[in-house]
Image (cartoon, coloured by chain):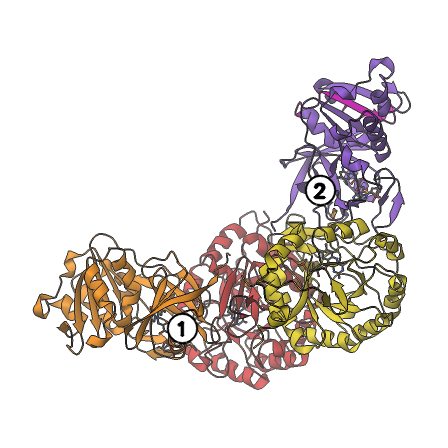
Chain colours: A purple, B orange, C yellow, D red
Amino acid sequence: MHEIASVPVKITEIRDETPTIKTFEFDGCFSSKAGQFCMVWIPGVDEVPMGFSSPSSITVQKVGEATEALFSLNVGDTIGIKGPLGNGYTPEGRVLVIAGGVGAAPLRPLALEGLADTFILGARTADEIVYKDELGSLTDLRISTDDGSYGHHGFVTDLLAGAGRGGSGVDPEDYDTICVCGPEIMMKNVLRILNEKDLSDRAQFSLVRYMKCGVGICGSCCLDDAGLRVCRDGPVFSGTDLLKSFEFGNYSRDATGRRVSGGGH
Amino acid sequence: MHEIASVPVKITEIRDETPTIKTFEFDGCFSSKAGQFCMVWIPGVDEVPMGFSSPSSITVQKVGEATEALFSLNVGDTIGIKGPLGNGYTPEGRVLVIAGGVGAAPLRPLALEGLADTFILGARTADEIVYKDELGSLTDLRISTDDGSYGHHGFVTDLLAGAGRGGSGVDPEDYDTICVCGPEIMMKNVLRILNEKDLSDRAQFSLVRYMKCGVGICGSCCLDDAGLRVCRDGPVFSGTDLLKSFEFGNYSRDATGRRVSGGGH
Amino acid sequence: MVSLLKEENIAVGGVSLDNHLILAAGVLGTTGASLKRMLSLGAGGVVTKSIGPYPKGGHKGPCVQVYDGAVMNAMGLPNPSEDFKVELSGLEGRPVIVSIFGGDPDEFSKVASWFSGMASVRGFELNVSCPHAEGYGAQIGSNPELVQECTEAVVKTGIPVWVKLTPNVTDITESGLAAEEGGASAVVAVNTVRAMRISTAMRRPVLGNGSGGLSGPAIFPVAVKCVYDLYEACRIPVVGCGGISDADNVIEMIMAGASAVEIGSGVLDNVGIFSEICGDLYSEEGENIEDLRGCAHA
Amino acid sequence: MVSLLKEENIAVGGVSLDNHLILAAGVLGTTGASLKRMLSLGAGGVVTKSIGPYPKGGHKGPCVQVYDGAVMNAMGLPNPSEDFKVELSGLEGRPVIVSIFGGDPDEFSKVASWFSGMASVRGFELNVSCPHAEGYGAQIGSNPELVQECTEAVVKTGIPVWVKLTPNVTDITESGLAAEEGGASAVVAVNTVRAMRISTAMRRPVLGNGSGGLSGPAIFPVAVKCVYDLYEACRIPVVGCGGISDADNVIEMIMAGASAVEIGSGVLDNVGIFSEICGDLYSEEGENIEDLRGCAHA
Ligand SMILES: Cc1cc2nc3c(=O)[nH]c(=O)nc-3n(C[C@H](O)[C@H](O)[C@H](O)COP(=O)(O)OP(=O)(O)OC[C@H]3O[C@@H](n4cnc5c(N)ncnc54)[C@H](O)[C@@H]3O)c2cc1C
Ligand SMILES: Cc1cc2nc3c(=O)[nH]c(=O)nc-3n(C[C@H](O)[C@H](O)[C@H](O)COP(=O)(O)OP(=O)(O)OC[C@H]3O[C@@H](n4cnc5c(N)ncnc54)[C@H](O)[C@@H]3O)c2cc1C
Ligand SMILES: Cc1cc2nc3c(=O)[nH]c(=O)nc-3n(C[C@H](O)[C@H](O)[C@H](O)COP(=O)(O)O)c2cc1C
Ligand SMILES: Cc1cc2nc3c(=O)[nH]c(=O)nc-3n(C[C@H](O)[C@H](O)[C@H](O)COP(=O)(O)O)c2cc1C
Ligand code: FES
Ligand code: FES
């Protein structure tokens, strides 16, 4: 049993990505790989899981108490970073990335490392597209918005299923690894499409579950039916594994452990 | 802080060295050097310090409860060995060994390793000479007995001071390192002689003090005036250091910490 | 190494088990699937997360800190309360012990009543020992009279009751005897040791709750002492818990007086710890547990 | 790292010290020479081995076991009793605190009387907390009334009295308040944590006495919690003790509420630990201890 330290880091830069999403750069560098996460300690508030959007940053969407508190911090403030935690993606060969909303955060390192051949990015609306310019310069970027205010009008799944309007669609067959993160309903639809094409074994999905410890001991994040820990055995699971999960896309558990409908986010 | 284990070992052989001294061989091998010791756990009785007379043996004189209990053990019985502890001798160049009684035990490894050029061995009487044949074949062995029943009639110090009867004396000047262990009054006399010849810096003495922990934390073995721990900073001290000790040769402390006259043994 | 002969029918304090190693309460015990996984990974029995009279979200994070040789936690007894019943479906006939907490005998008996008819429940474990929950846990466990009353309340269900004790008392045998008096079938020793760490960089405690409970190898010597003392004081079996990480630790607990053991923090390094320890613990040439149990007592 | 400004005159609970780091009782404290050595190696003060009403040889060995991150001991309070006075000659004017134990207030006051006139004694520390001595130590420390009476008995000497508490009680603040009530100038928290290990090869406890007390890094989180609680409960200063091994640990104890610290097991790895920690702890840019003390309290 070795120490898993919560390292105090100073925030060095805060970037507005969208009206509800900010990136926090800090003065500590963690040897994380894409898909790995950290437990972020906001002193006096809470400790919550966040994917590394780079070895020295997290990208956060404001959704509740902890994230609001994060948003109120300034450059120079100190937070605690415990990580890298979890397994991360294992990209091989040609890599297709599919991200929805802030789900782009843990996928960003793939683009930064030049591993993402194609990057499909979905958002609710034009304003909510994260990392647009950066990803555009680093990868072959395809964008969809639910309201059509930018790129393909519709869902990221459209870009997989057919060619997509404006020729922005891709053929998942052309890729060896398909890395996905986003709202669980989106991921479920991606998995359905890939499964129809018999490609579920090429797909890797990063899941969100309520995490209390982040290190694999408390059990709050376990996923039915195999009982695997999202924080330790995941958060990245293969499509094949998720096909066996009755829970995936159907329900998740809240802080008390009660089942609530809808996956994590 | 790392574990200092008491390793359970089985006694594999018990040799009578003299009527009051036995050697216990055991089935564990400790990477000890001459002068280092172990804490020997005699289950249900006590734990007492003993020099390693080889990496897998101790040589014990029966003096009280713990040593009597040791003497009552048989081949196959289990004892605990915690060690090697302490600093040990640091022989360099030509080595003269001076041993009195069971004090030969921690010096035996020097002879076994071929490092003892000359070995002066004192005993009360012929019966009480330890390792006689073995040492005779390994080193240039000179023996004295208090009662003259074997070798030089008198004390080991005679063999240093003059030539000794029968030409068994040596000139300590001829040696680079002089390793000594025996009754404290004998060691004190050796130191006096060597100091007269200005050789105290070549001499290394192994001391005995009441040891409760053996690892340097309890303080029961500390030596005046420097307050050094015999179990950790020693048990081997240079002649130069001991010249500064008012305690050496004058008194020691018992289990309670009260001063009792006479050095350790 | 000393090893154990695997008996045919292992039963401790009225609960039959697949082997002597039980998953401790609150560790990977929130969902039925995860309990099932631990059984399939070699646990001889599992204790669920402690269930209380109403749902609780638990303390704000950080809830867990991991150190060299120790875990410190202040979960705050998060639990789904009665909704937990759904997690137990599919565990019928398996060695499952439901951990219960409450603020008084009535709450204990209310929670027990939800589970007492279920085919998937072989026993109850009463958590009167969590050191960081206001009004629950150790606040009950440090009062022998309350321990006895809460035990009596759950014993009425007719299902075997184990009482899990806190080491954070002047004399743990008083709690043990109170549990015995109340009709417990076994005592479990121990829950976590009261503790706190402070982040000097943050100038505040490292747990959201301030203080918490220590577990893992660091508390093993504390647990052994408690088991040893309880074995001398009580007639009912003692289940050892706290810091166990290998088969020799299990033998040590048995020699101190344990009839079985629970393992929690050990899963952190190795989720396969149960089958690994079983592999080392049992052998054909092993000794009967009756010959080893309590053999370190003079 | 947070560092401390070195004050001109450090005084804690009526005892003036050379720095905030004190050698804990029973560790290299049997002889005057060894106490002198620890002062010259950087200790800001030293506590002697606990001295009792008559000489004791202590328990049979093994007396000490060393584990990864922990020490376990059952010395059995060996001490030369009144003869210890001779050890203090040469320590006149140095920051020496004499540790005392006894079975009742009279024994405490008897032992104190031997030392109360000496120029080498700046204070007394009452050991009401050793967990492995029949009739002494924790058997007194777990009874608040006795703690108060023993404190009162020694306070009469007019010399500052520190009372060293045991963590092996349900509520350490009761003991702390009893010491304060009795006129103590400070409380010291903590003595060792009750513990036992068993050798599976020998089938018996690894200490000659059976059980003993745990010290070293493993108990640091337990000690921090006790200091934190005492700081909230008491008005007299708290001296932190237990598992301190570096300067950050010292800062952590201060943030929990300590006014100074004692270090025992830390000397095992490094007899020069005092000057090493001083080097890291103090700096020109350091903060005032008044600003750091207790700052982790909400
Ligand atoms: C592995 C992993 C990686 C994540 N990466 C990111 C990321 O890169 N960017 C990002 O913005 N968000 C990420 N999240 C989600 C993020 O953890 C939650 O948005 C955050 O915890 C909400 O906290 P809150 O107090 O602001 O919200 P609350 O008001 O507490 O709740 C809002 C929502 O957040 C969920 N939530 C609250 N606490 C937790 C928790 N401890 N663990 C999981 N979910 C929680 C709630 O269930 C609810 O759905 C990730 C989650 C996981 C599990
Ligand atoms: C570093 C060192 C190496 C030693 N090497 C040897 C050796 O190789 N062979 C050998 O025969 N003896 C050796 N001794 C001495 C040996 O430790 C004692 O003879 C033994 O402890 C006596 O125990 P007892 O119970 O039989 O005697 P007791 O009846 O207890 O006392 C007899 C004498 O032994 C001394 N003694 C008792 N316990 C201890 C103790 N814990 N530490 C030190 N002295 C003690 C007493 O002070 C007294 O002088 C060594 C001692 C030390 C310190
Ligand atoms: C994260 C965590 C959660 C725990 N939750 C509970 C609980 O709900 N009920 C309980 O009785 N004990 C709980 N415990 C205590 C354990 O069951 C066990 O008694 C303790 O951890 C000591 O055992 P170990 O060292 O093997 O972990 C918890 C321990 C941990 C580490
Ligand atoms: C070998 C040893 C002997 C001790 N003897 C005493 C003693 O005589 N009196 C006392 O009050 N505490 C005694 N203690 C306890 C220490 O003073 C201290 O409270 C404890 O070890 C915790 O601090 P540490 O972790 O820094 O060692 C002893 C501890 C050890 C390890
Ligand atoms: S969050 Fe605790 S096990 Fe995953
Ligand atoms: S015997 Fe304990 S310090 Fe030497």
Q: Residue B103 falls in which quadrant of the image?
A: bottom left
Q: Does residue C63 show up?
A: no
Question: Residue B252 at x, y = what percent?
Answer: 35, 74
Chain that bears disc 1? B
Q: Amino acid at mark 2?
A: Asp
Q: Amino acid at mark 1?
A: Asn
Please tell me which residue lies in front, C106 or C19.
C19
Number of the label disc, if any, that sits on residue B74: 1
Please tell me which residue lies in front, C227 or C132.
C227
Q: Quadrant of the C terminus of chain D?
A: bottom right
Q: Is residue D245 left or right of residue D36?
A: right
Please tell me which residue lies in front, B133 or C63.
B133
Q: What residue occupies the far left of the structure in this picture?
A: B166
Camera-nearest label, 2 or 1: 1
Task: Report the magenta residues as a range.
Answer: A113-134
Ligand 3 shows up in the quarter that is bottom right
Residue occupying the point 44% across, 59% down: D271
Number of the label disc, if any, that sits on residue B184: none
Do discs 2 and 1 belong to a common subunit?
no
Q: Residue A35 falls in which quadrant of the image?
A: top right
Residue occupying the point 62% across, 66% down: C253
Residue occupying the point 18% across, 63% down: B141
Question: Residue A149 at x, y = what percent?
Answer: 89, 20
Number of the label disc, if any, that sits on residue A233: 2
Q: Tell me if residue D267 is in the magenta stretch.
A: no
Q: Residue B206 falls in which quadrant of the image?
A: bottom left
Q: Secondary structure at mark 1?
A: loop
Q: Is residue D186 left or right of residue A86?
A: left
The CA distance from mark 2 to mark 1 is: 54 Å
